[in-house]
Image (cartoon, rainbow, N blue to C red):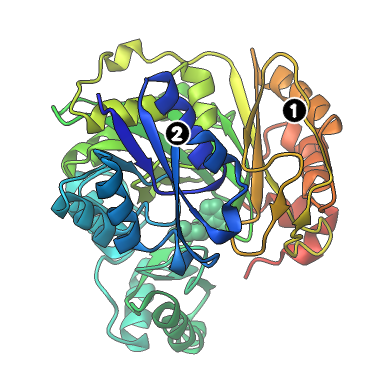
Amino acid sequence: MFKKVLIANRGEIAVRVIRTCKSLGITTIGVYSEADADAPHVKMADEAYLIGGPRVAESYLNINKILEVALESGAEAIHPGYGLLSENTDFARRCEEAGLIFIGPSPEVISKMGSKIESRKAMEEAGVPVVPGITYPLADEEEAVEAADRIGYPVMLKASAGGGGIGMQVVHNGDEIRKAFAGNQKRATDFFGDGAMYIEKFVENPRHIEIQILADSLGNTVYLWERECSIQRRHQKVVEEAPSSFITEETRTKMGEAAVKAAKSIGYKNAGTIEFLVDEEQNFYFLEMNTRLQVEHPVTEEITGLDLVEKQLQIAAGDALEFSQEEVKREGHSIEVRIYAEDPKTFFPSPGKITKLELPNGPGVRHELAIHGQSVVTPFYDPMIAKLVVKGSNREEAINRLQDALVDYHIEGIKTNIPMLQEVIAHPAFQSGDTTTDFVNKYLKTKKANNIK
Ligand code: MV4
């Protein structure tokens, strides 16, 4: 195992990674920006180095500076967390070139999965179901209309480099495509520097269900069941749970096996997630692969009893997975909610100084925190300030524990989305498991502020 690891991230995920490193006796190197001198991850790390100004481009995305700190401090490996540099092909390659181990898959795999068209192609070749559609960049809107006529409407126009719904639109006929094409292509070019567009059949009322996998460098790949993440607001996940109450045992096995096949076919290594859309008939289709540890990984840890950060470190150090697929357990039910510093009515970020923080506890309650009781939440970073994770022996118990915990969760000084989370969890549709991707628009009182294009 490594002796020294640099954590190239901030907030709750940096804290999370440091915690496991400490439990394994690994010395932790933190990095921080001028805005984060007082942040929890800085206090927790064994050593912490200032790497630049508050804006991420000056600090947490500053590859040269981060590599310099890693080399000077004697770190052997870098954990990128999620977001920031975690899916940056150039960073993974630069780590390799500097003789540092990037804790994640190879730069080639990150790059391939970063392109929606490339990853679709890879999955088609591997025999993993993809949504009926095309697997090449469209030359222009007329080619899009031709393809859509073949696929059948409605279709979804998508950007190959897309994320967060950017460059994506549902279209119902040729005229709509002609109207939508150039605008979406331009947005994709502006945001990602890549205007490649493709189309897929539009899947109605889908659920977002993803499979966690682990792959070691010796060829062992296992799936750690699913997470259901259908409740999202503007492509931001809000509530995640495991297991899904929607899929059958048969679908669960098929999806797990498809995810392992997907990972093996591309030579995947480390922890990864295959996202699927699941339709009302339980057909599932590959959507995209996330080549990093995800925000919602704790719900998988809760039902499997595994520490995913520990597995990532072991895999990166060259160790074999010490268990087989049959030995992966699935016990109880876990739900995570993301707590954002935002106005619960307007959903605008709500930075400011925290004046009071009182956290619930009790059986089955877990916290992942980016803040402490006197933190200043700045506007420079993602407004997610904490995750509340609960576990129960079944979904009902998990829901009850979550409701109680949210009542006892007190943050003062800034506004948070806790009222919205309470509304979701208390809703009969959530309680009965009716959790499709249009939940927020369909059921919440606040839905006017939640328009999805
Ligand atoms: C879709 C879809 C329906 N049909 N693709 C949204 C984010 C992006 N990564 C893919 N997304 C979707 N792709 C087809 N062919 C519906 C969505 C979608 C969605 C997916 C998962 C969770 C929430 C969502 C909210 C709106 C649309």
Q: Decide: is 32 above or below 45.
A: below
Mark 1 or 2, nearer chain start? 2
- Which residue appears at 47% of the width and 16% of the height? 305
Q: Is residue 119 visible?
A: no
Question: Do the numbered discs 1 and 2 sit on residues whose CB atoms are within 8 Å?
Answer: no
Crowding near the residue tagged with mark 2, few <14, some 14–19, many ≥20 C-alpha atoms within 10 Å: some
Q: Which residue is mark 1?
A: 402
- Which residue appears at 86% of the width and 31% of the height? 407
Q: Quadrant of residue 255?
A: top left
Residue kind at label 2, given as amino acid type: Asp
Mark identifier at residue 155: none
Q: Which residue is mark 2?
A: 46
Residue kind at label 1, given as amino acid type: Leu
Report x, y in % for residue 357.
Answer: 80, 37
Residue 419 appears left or right of 121: right
Crowding near the residue tagged with mark 1, few <14, some 14–19, many ≥20 C-alpha atoms within 10 Å: many
Between residues 102 and 253, which one lies in front from this camera angle? 102
Q: Secondary structure at mark 2?
A: loop
